[in-house]
Amino acid sequence: MNSVWKDESQTNKRQRWMLVFIIFVGVILLGRLFYLQILNGSQYDLESRENRIRVLKVMPQRGNIYDVNGELLVTTRTAYTIAMIDLGEEKVQQSAQVLSQLLNIPSESIIAQVDNRERRAEAVYVAIDVDFAMVTKVLERSESLPGVYIDYLPIREYPYGSVLSHVLGYLSEISQDDLDTWAAGQGYVMGDLVGRAGLERSFESILRGTNGGVIVEVDSQDNLIRVLERVEPVAGKDLHLTIDIKLQQEAELLLENSLVTIRSQPWGTYQAKEAYSGAFIMLENKTGRILAMASYPDYDPNDWELGVLKDEEKRVQYLIGSKEYPNAMLNRAVLAALPPGSIFKPITLAAALESGVVQRYETIQCKGYYDVLDTDNPPKCWVYPSSHGWINATEALAHSCNAYFYELGRRLGIDELDHYASMFGLGEDTGFEDLLFESEGNYQFTHRSNPEYKVWAYENYLISEEDWYEGETIFSAIGQQYSAFTPLQMASAMAQIANRGNRYAPALVDYMIDSEGNRVQIFQKSLLKTADLQATTWETIHQGLVAVTQPGGTSERTYFGNLENIYLWKDLPFKVAAKTGTAQVANDPLDLKSHAWFSAYAPAEDPEITMTMVIEAGRSGSSSCGPAISQMIRHYYEQTLLPIEIKKQ
C-alpha cells in the first residue's frame, strides 16, 4: 500500500514539474510572439513583402531636342530587345539553347548573363536592338522559350551625327562618383544612362523623365510567380534651341575644310601646316542668342552604344587623340582660352579714347618698330621692315598697326587698360549658363594680362618672377603677354561693340515643352553690362573696323587654297565691320604656330549678327578665317558665295 502511494506521489510530482515547464515555455513563446507580431510586426511584415515583391524598372523616353526651326536634332528610338527572366535552371538552359540558334551566340554566354545578375527576378537583355524579323521568330517559338519576352529600350539617336556634338553631348553609364555627388538621392542606380556632356548633361533633369516599373511577385527562391502591376514611365521634356542647324552644318563644314585647305595651300606665309583645330561662334547681337557654335575636332555621339564607347579605334581617337585629331571632346568655342592678338585692339582704343590719352585724329608714327622703351631691341610692327608712317586711330585699326597700340598701352598703363578689358567681359564669366562648365572667371581657365594674374601665376610656379614691367603693358595692349580669352568671350565683346555698349548673356536653349504639351520659356534676354562710352569713341572704333574690310584694310583681300587676291567682301549689298588677329605663342620664333583670329559684325550700318572664328596655329586671321566668315555672312543673308575651293577630308 505504501509502495503504491509513493509511486503515485512521485508521478504527481513529475506532472507538476512538467506543468511548470510547459507554462514557462509557453510564457516565453507568447512573449516572443508578442514581440514579433505586436512590437515588431510591421518590420517583419515589410521584410516578408520585400522577400516576395520585386520592382523591375521601365525606362522613360528621353526628351527630344530641336533646332530653332523645329528640326529634330536628338530623339529616342524604341529598340526591340530580347529579355529573359530566370524561371529555374532547367528552363534557362532550354531557352538559352533556342536563343543560341536564333541569335548565333553561344548558349554559355546567355546562361552566364542570367547567372551574373544581382537578383533572380531581374531580367537580362540577351540581344538589344534586334530587327522585326528576329522579333517574329522569337514570338513564333515562344512556347519553347520559357521566361523570354520582347521588351523595348529607348535608344538615343543623333540624326546629324557629329554635327553640333559639343553642344548636344552624349549619354554614358552613371558612375559611382555621379551617385555620390550630383545624382545622389535622385533615384539613379548603377547601369542607368545619364547625360555625360553638352545639353544632355546640363539639362539631364529635364530631358530624363520619370522611371516606370513592373511590380512582380516571386517565391522564396526568387522565381517569378506573376506580374502584379505595371506603372508607365513619364517621358522627358523636349528642348528647343536657338541654333539653326543649316547654319551650323555650314559653319562646321567651313571650319573643318578650312583647316584642310590652309595646311596644304602653296602660299608660304599663309601655309599653316600645324593647324588641326579651331572654333566658330555666331551670335544674335541684340539678344545673345547663339545661332551656331562649332568646335573641331568633333565626335559622333551615336558611337556610344547604350552608353558605352565600344569601338577601340574611336576610343583612341576621341579620348586619347593625336596631333591630327587633338582633344576631340573639348568644346573649344567655350573652353579654349587663347591669346587674342590683334582682335583685342578695339578695346585698347576704347580705353585710350575714353581716358583722353589719345585724340580721335591724332597721329602717331610707326617706324616699323617701337623704340620708346627699348632702343637696343625694340618690338616690331607686323609690317617690319616696312612701316605705316604717321597714322590716326581709324587707320591704326584698319592696318592693325602694332606700334600705334604699343604707344597707347604705354600712355594708358596696365590698370586703366585692364579696367576696360573687364568692362568688355574679357577674362570674366560671360553669363552663358546652358552648358555646365567651370566658372569662366577662374584663372586656370581664362585671364586678362595684369599684375594680379602675374602674381597668381608666380605663386603657382607658372612663371619665375612676379614684378610687373612696362614692357608687359605694351604687349598686353595688342592682346599678347598673359591674355587668354575664349572665342565666346571675344564674340561677346565684339557684339558689345556692335551694340555700342550693351552686352547680353549668350544662350542656346530657347524653350521646352512640358509633359502636357505646354511651352515653357527658358531663354530670357539678359543684359549683363552696358559700357557707357562717348558717341565719338564708338564711331571711331566702328569706322576703323569697317575700314578693315575696305581697300587697304587687313581683310580686304587674301590668299586661300590655290587662289590669290580673293576680295572677301565684293558684291555684298552692305558693309562688314571686322578685325583680324594673329596671336603669337611662346617658343615659336618663326611664327609657325601663331593662332589665327577673325571677328566681324554685319551689316555694319545696323549690326544684327557677330561671328568669331579661331584656328589654332592658323598663322593668318585674314587667310585662315576670313573666307569662312565671309561665306557664312553670305549664307545668312542669301548672297552670292565666294568662288573659293574648299578642300574636303
Image (cartoon, helix red, strand yellow):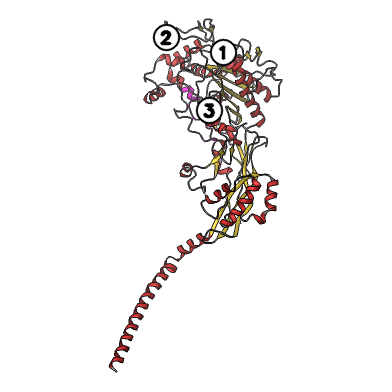
Residue indicated by mark 3: 321
Indicate which disc residue 394 carries. Answer: 1
271 lies above or below 321: above
Give the CA distance from mark 2 to mark 1.
24 Å
Specify the segment rendered in magenta. 419-437
Disc 1: CA contacts within 10 A as few (<14), some (14-19) or many (>=20): many
Whether residue 427 is in magenta: the answer is yes
> Farthest residue in the bottom direction?
1
Q: Nearer the viewer, residue 327 or 574?
A: 327
Q: Quadrant of the C terminus?
A: top right
Give the CA distance from mark 1 to mark 3.
44 Å
Q: Nearer the viewer, residue 467 or 15?
A: 15
Which comes sooner in the sequence, label 2 or label 1? 2
Q: Quadrant of the N terminus?
A: bottom left
Disc 3: CA contacts within 10 A as few (<14), some (14-19) or many (>=20): some
Mark 2 residue type: Leu
Which SS class for mark 1? helix
